[in-house]
């Protein structure tokens, strides 16, 4: 999928690829976190608080672009959590909004990336387990380009 997205970016350019109207339709960006053993409860709660605050991120026009953020603890009793402790679902109205949010390594030009999300990734990175610290999976509504 990453290769396909890079091909789309190369084909249309960063301004179009990150535009609000690029490939409209709901995108649910699912993120799971697994932490180093040394990470404290307080640090984990700060991760969730900082992630939730990304809901207020705005584009250069001052308008927010994230539809919603849901975040919380793993609470399944199925035994298939694979050690992930927190789950987050970020909902976007288009793939363009998702592309703007993701930024690097997908989009390298800072004019077309969310600086607040980039700062969050810098914060959370050292807290995550060395192997499989984050799992990211995007669910795109059927028939939505």
Image: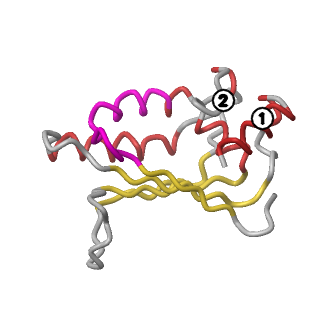
- Decide: is 128 above or below 93: above
**C-beta proximity under 8 Å, tags 2 and 1:** yes
Magenta stretch holds residue 141: no
| Position in image of residue 74 (x %, y %) | 30, 64
- Mark sitting on residue 107: 2
The picture quadrant where one finds residue 140 is bottom right
Furthest toward the top, the residue is: 110
Quick one: 6 or 94, which is closer to the camera?
6
Residue at position x 27%, y 74% in the image: 79
- Decide: is 49 above or below 121: below
Q: Secondary structure at mark 1?
A: helix
The picture quadrant where one finds residue 86 is bottom left
Residue at position x 25%, y 45% in the image: 35
Residue at position x 76%, y 43% in the image: 20
| Position in image of residue 7 (x %, y %) | 78, 38
Furthest toward the right, the residue is: 11
Q: CA distance from mark 2 to mark 1?
A: 8 Å
- Decide: is 80 above or below 130: below
* Mark 1, other Cα within 10 Å: few <14 / some 14–19 / many ≥20: some
The answer to whether 7 appears left or right of 127 in the picture is right
- The residue beneath circle 1 is 9
Quick one: 54 or 94, which is closer to the camera?
94
The C terminus - image quarter: bottom right
Residue interval drawn in magenta: 118-134
- Decide: is 132 above or below 61: below
- 2 or 1: tag closer to the N-terminus: 1
Q: Secondary structure at mark 2?
A: loop
């Amino acid at each position: 999928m990453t290769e396909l997205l890079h091909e789309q970016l190369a084909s249309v350019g960063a301004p179009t690829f990150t535009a609000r109207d690029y490939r409209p339709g709901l995108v649910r960006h699912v993120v799971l976190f697994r932490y180093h053993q040394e990470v404290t409860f307080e640090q984990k709660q700060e991760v969730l608080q900082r992630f939730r605050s990304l809901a207020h991120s705005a584009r250069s026009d001052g308008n927010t672009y994230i539809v919603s953020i849901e975040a919380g603890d793993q609470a399944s009793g199925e035994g298939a959590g694979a050690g992930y402790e927190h789950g987050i679902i970020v909902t976007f109205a288009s793939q363009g909004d998702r592309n703007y949010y993701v930024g690097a390594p997908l989009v390298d030009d800072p004019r077309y990336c969310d600086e607040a999300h980039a700062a969050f990734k810098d914060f959370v990175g050292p807290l995550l387990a060395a192997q499989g610290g984050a799992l990211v999976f995007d669910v795109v509504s059927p028939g939505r380009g």
